[in-house]
Amino acid sequence: MTVTTTSPGSKTAARPFRLAFPPVSGTLRPRQLAVCAGLVVAVFVALCWNVSIGEYGIPLADVARALTGSGDPGTLLVVQELRLPRAMTGLLAGIAFGMSGALFQTMTRNPLASPDMIGLTQGAGTAVVAGIVLGWDFGLGTQALGLFGALASALLVYGLAWRRGTTGYRIILVGIGVSWVCLSVTDFLLARGGRFQAQAALGWLVGNLNGRDWQQAAPLAYALVVLVPAALLIGRLMRTLQLGDDVAKGLGTRVQAVRLTVLLTGVGLVAFATAAAGPVAFVALAAPQIAQRLCRTAWPPPLAGGLTGAAIVLASDVLARELIPGTELPVGIVTGVLGAPVLLWLLIRVNRAGSGG
């Protein structure tokens, strides 16, 4: 391993430095490291807070001890078996949504590009609703159906946007059209399905962590073990795309190959997250933008975006459970209410900047 600074001189307060683990290397910036460290602390606090609330309240200190395996048996049972699976599902889904949003926004060079804006979340939702309402799950389960739906939607968007290559602008426009088609199909399925099937599907469609256990959290965790490192490595390749396709090609970047790799990685992230927690609204849109402003970078950093997404989902789940005493709202309702102003702000900002992607 080698460590080198990236600029000479005596002003070293915020100077980035380079880590090299051949064949992989990267530049670490002090501000990004500090922001990510702060976000890790925020996520841990939100996780403990999430686990502590309920009919049987548990002090935060006891929750922290129970997470390490110490404490009385009753507390360990409540924390590790009853509440932690729900919180971990929210944490992992938030990471996946945040990282996928960062990838798509960087790839398209547009802050409005996110899985729930370009049809991927809706595609996963349509497939899962078809499985619930029509019984077309073929024994695969919601994870596999969500992955299939998101992948099919992504391939449709990519194919329709292809014209001697793809551009971020075309992907967004085609994605909006595909999302409306998926929403219409979903509405048709809900109208056709029985009362109880439609109720179950609607409860899932708004984004919900109620009743989640390790069966939902485990597949998502296994997927993130593969997809998170892939997203971080792809993040380096996408830096040249920020300069424009022509410049990136001149620098030797295989633009379409990178774009397709980003698309597949982002699809995997959003598909597994949607299958586990439902299509939690606006997290993939808002988290990368918040992370970008915290890190003061040109485009959303994937790691900080994922951590921000985890903090948003966990905190929103706490609000969903505590906002109305005696009632647990779906977490997607809270994120939707909080995310709508962010979307309006981004629309105003993009309109003023004249950004087209």
Image (spheres, rainbow, N blue to C red):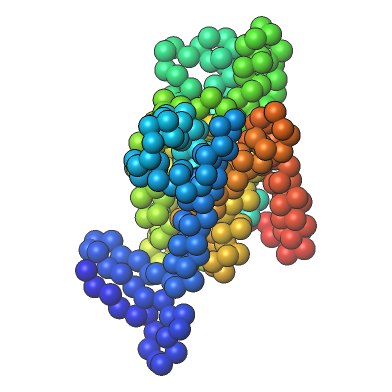
In this rendering, would 12 be left or right of 47? left
- Quarter containing the C terminus: bottom right
In this rendering, would 228 be left or right of 170? left
Name the residue: 66% across, 41% down.
Answer: 319
In this rendering, would 352 be left or right of 254? right
Percent from the top left, x then y, of residue 167?
57, 51
Q: Pick whichever, 263 or 136, lies toward us.
A: 136
Percent from the top left, x then y, of residue 139?
42, 13
Please say if 81 is above or below 95.
Answer: above
Please say if 33 is above or below 122.
Answer: below
Q: Pick whichever, 39 or 321, lies toward us.
A: 321
Percent from the top left, x then y, of residue 36?
47, 61
Percent from the top left, x then y, of residue 356?
68, 56
Q: Pick whichever, 107 or 144, lies toward us.
A: 144
In this rendering, would 123 be left or right of 27? right
Q: Residue furthest bottom?
A: 10
Name the residue: 53% across, 24% down.
Answer: 211
Q: Residue 210, can we see it?
A: yes
Please say if 304 is above or below 122.
Answer: below
- Quarter containing the N terminus: bottom left
